Image: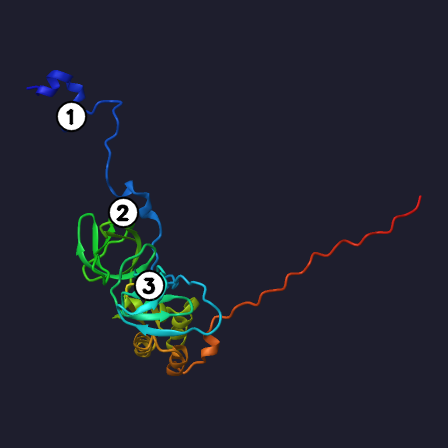
Amino acid sequence: MPTFQERRFGRDRFPRSGGPRREGGPPRRSFGRREFPERDRPSPRYGAPGGQKFEHRIEEQPETPGPHITRVVVPGEKLADTPRPAPFAFIEGGKTYSSILGLYDETDGKLVPLEGCYLPSIGDYVVGVVQDVKFAGYNLDIKSPYIGFLSNKETREEFELGDILIAKVQEVDEVKNVHLSDASKLEGGEIMEILSVKIPRVIGKRSSMINMIQGATKSEIIVGKNGRVWLRGGNSGLAVVAILKIAKEAHIPGLTDRIAALLNVSAEAQQPQQQPQQPLQEPQQPAQQPEQGV
């Protein structure tokens, strides 16, 4: 018996299941994995044997030459008698005060926090742990008040609960939903946690500190901006001691020399060398040939 749709619009427009399909009709769409070409891109394997080497990158701001005067400040302590808008500081009555416990550089006017939780920022690489597997992706614990979400569209691998991943913060919206991308599983090794505000000191200028630790211990080390550090192989015990010492003494001058003495290496050899600037040379004028008489 024909249905209502078949009587009103014709039988060829609504073919029954198992019957012949209408010729010339559009193909039925499929929402399989082949719909997303970004899944076919290669995924870095930082923890796998023969995988890629992770590069620690941190934004470096130019410093004022000469000696720097630093001091430890507490919340509410006055930083300057003039209004100076800066992170982790507030202005009241035309004066600048600190809102955190941190290290204040009076020369550059920078305030570096000594305590605090990790707040995701676009471009950060974080070490997360899979804590929930959903149909659309994975929820990751990124050691933050906010949960990181890795969509299935951003990876072609399948992960399980408890897997340790290195991922990049792709987007943070106005309600602090953290979207991750470029994820890869870290296989084996161990995880340690420190305060996220100590990570710049662990990495060092131009990655000098972390390179010194890796060279002395022969360990594979990946440092996440969220305060998690993954280590594998080599003398990982000595690497853990060095990183904990950095986190404990990050605000004390002479840290590089103390870590070099702990690792029994030369601190001068690990410092980034700056290439001397070549003096500008004036362009040479071409030699003038004497005019020949007629």
Q: Are marks 1 and 3 in contact (CB under 8 Å)?
A: no
Q: Residue at x 21, y 53 (%)?
A: 138
Q: CA distance from mark 2 to mark 1?
A: 35 Å
Q: Label 2, on which residue? A: 153
Q: Are marks 3 and 2 in contact (CB under 8 Å)?
A: no
Mark toward the viewer: 3 or 2: 3
> Mark 1 sits on what residue?
19
Dividing the picture into quadrants, the one containing residue 204 is bottom left
Q: Earlier in the sequence, mark 2 or mark 1?
A: 1
Q: Residue at x 34, y 65 (%)?
A: 49
* Residue type at numbered disc 1: Gly
The answer to whether 241 is drawn above or below residue 13 in the figure is below
Q: Is residue 21 above or below residue 154?
A: above
The amino acid pointed to by label 2 is: Lys
Kind of residue indicated by mark 3:
Lys
Separation of residues labelled 1 and 3 (CA atoms): 81 Å
Viewer-nearest residue: 2 or 158? 158
Instruction: Report the quarter where the C terminus lies.
Output: top right
Q: Quadrant of the N terminus?
A: top left
Residue 154, position as x, y percentages in the image: 29, 49
